[in-house]
Image (cartoon, helix red, strand yellow):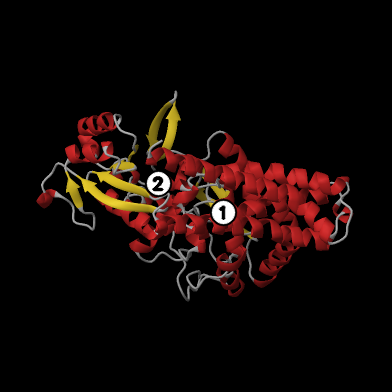
Amino acid sequence: MGRTGLRRADDASAAVQLRAVDAAILVFAMPALNLTLGRRLDANYLLLQTLAAALFIVFAQLAGLYRSWRMQPLPVEIGRLVLVWVAVLSTLLGMAFAFKVSDAFSRLLLGVWAVAVPGLMGVWRLNLRQRNRINAQRGTARRTIAFAGVSPAAHRIAEHIGNATWMGATIAGAYDDRTPDRLSPGALGLLGNTRDLLRDARQGKIDEVYVTLPLHAQGRIVQIVNALADTTVSVYVVPDAFIFDMMHASWAEVGGYPVISIYSTPFFGVDGSLKRLEDLALGALILILISPLLAVIAAAIKLTSPGPVLFRQRRYGLNGQIVEVWKFRSMTVSEDGDTVVQARRGDTRVTRLGAFLRRTSLDELPQFINVLQGRMSIVGPRPHAIAHNEEYRRLIHGYMLRHKVKPGITGWAQINGWRGETDTLEKMRKRVEYDLYYMRNWSLLFDLRIIFLTAFRGFNSKNAY
C-alpha cells in the first residue's frame, strides 16, 4: 500500500476512534462514577445512560461533530462538542421534569457526570491531535499537498493548512501552465506545469492535489482530473471562489447530482421541521417564564403614558410576505407608513420608560407571541420596517435574501454588536453580512449558541435608543 493509502487508513482509523471512544465514555462513565461514589446503578440510571447515548448520536450527527475533524481547529471542535452535550442535557432535563422523575437521581452524581463526559471527550481529542502533531514532526503520517492552479483560493487553503499543524500536512507548492508573470501573487511556490504534476504524482511525491483553476477552465480541469486517475493521489476540485462569494452558496443534491445552491432557504424539509419545533418548544417555555414580566411592563406603559400597550408594525416576513410584528410601545407615536424615521440618540418621541425598554430589548418580548403564531422565529434576521426595506434593497446587493427565512427576535448580527440605529449604509451592510452568514451556516446548535449568547450580549446595547 502506498503512502496515500496508509494516510487514508490513518484518517479513517482516527474517525472510528473518535466515535468509539465517545461511545465508550457514554457507556462507562456513569457506572464508573456510581462505583466511585459507592452507589448502586439501578434501572433509572441505565435508562438515563441509554437515552443520553442515543441523543448524543442524533445531535452529533446534526452538528457534524465527526465531519472533517482534521480540518477544524481544536477550540471549534470542542465548542461543537460542548454544544452537543448541552443539547443532550437540556433534552434530558426537560424529559425528567415532564415525567416527574427528577427526584430519582442524585444531584451530585449527575453534576459530576455532566462535567466528566465532555471533559473526557475533550481530553481524548487533545491527545489525538497531539499524537498527530508529533507524528508529523517525526515525518510519519505526514501528507504532502499540492495545488493545480495558482489562485486566491489556493493561497487561502495553503495558509489555513500551514497554520493548522495538527493536520500533519506539508504544502509542496503549485503547478500551473501559465507563466509566472500571469499568476496571482502569494506565498505558493511554483513547482512546474501540469506535466510535472503528473510526473511527481506518479512518483509518489504528492499525497493530495487540490484543483483550484477558474471555472471557465472546465476543459483543463477535466483533463487534469482524468490524468490524475492514473495515480494514487487524492484529488479535490475547489469550486471557483466567486461562486461561494455569491451571498448564499452551498452544496445541495438534485436527482443524485451535486449542485451548488446560490439563493435558497436553509429551512427546507427536516431542517424546517426542526426549526419550527425549536420555536414552538422554546417559545412556549420562554413565554411561560416571562409572563409575570410581561404583565409588569404592560401595566407600567399604561400608567406612564397615554396610548396602547402594544405597537403593531408591518414588516417583511418569510419570502417577503407582509406580517404584523408586535412590540411594547416605547414612543409617543406609532409610525407605520411609507416613511419611518429611525430612533436616534435623544429622540423626543421615545418615552422615559420606552428608552429603558429599547436599551434592554424588553420592548421586543411580545414577539415571542409572534413566534408561536408562526410569523417569526426566535433566531433569525431582525425584521425592518417596510419603508426601510424598500430603501435598502436598492442600496445593498443581496439585501432581500434576508427574507428567505423568517425574521427573528435575536440574531447573529445582534449579538455581534450590529443592533440599533443604522445611521450609515456601512452599518446596514455589516448587519446584512452577518445575517447571510447565519443563513449559510445554520444549525440547531448554532441557534442554541445565539440564544445563549443573547442572555449576555443581546439585552443591552449602546446603539439602541
| Secondary element at image label 2 | helix
Q: Residue 297 at what x, y percent from top left?
A: 69, 66
Indicate left or right for 80 with 319 as reference: right
Q: CA distance from mark 1 to mark 2?
A: 30 Å
Q: Quadrant of residue 160?
A: bottom left
Type of the residue with mark 2:
Met
- Residue matched to label 1: 80
Tell me residue 140's x, y (percent).
42, 51
Can residue 291 be seen at all in this image of the molecule? no
80 shown above or below 216 = below
Please state the horizontal and vertical placement of residue 38, each as a whole percent of the image: 88, 60
Among the 4 quarters of the image, the one containing residue 298: bottom right
Residue beneath label 2, please?
400
Nearer to me, 439 or 85 = 85
Quadrant of the image containing the N terminus: top left
**As rendered, which of 271 and 91 lies closer to the eye?**
91
Question: Does any portion of residue 14 appear in the rendered image?
Answer: yes
Q: Residues within 10 Å of mark 2 (few under 14, many from 20)?
A: some
Name the residue located 83 percent from the left edge and 56 percent from the top edge. Answer: 34
Residue at (52, 51) in percent of width and height: 380
Identify the secondary structure beneath mark 1: helix
Q: How many marks on residues?
A: 2
Do residues under tags 1 and 2 come within 8 Å of each other at their CB atoms?
A: no
Q: Pick the residue in front: 148 or 218.
A: 148
Give the amino acid type for the residue marked by disc 1 in the picture.
Answer: Arg
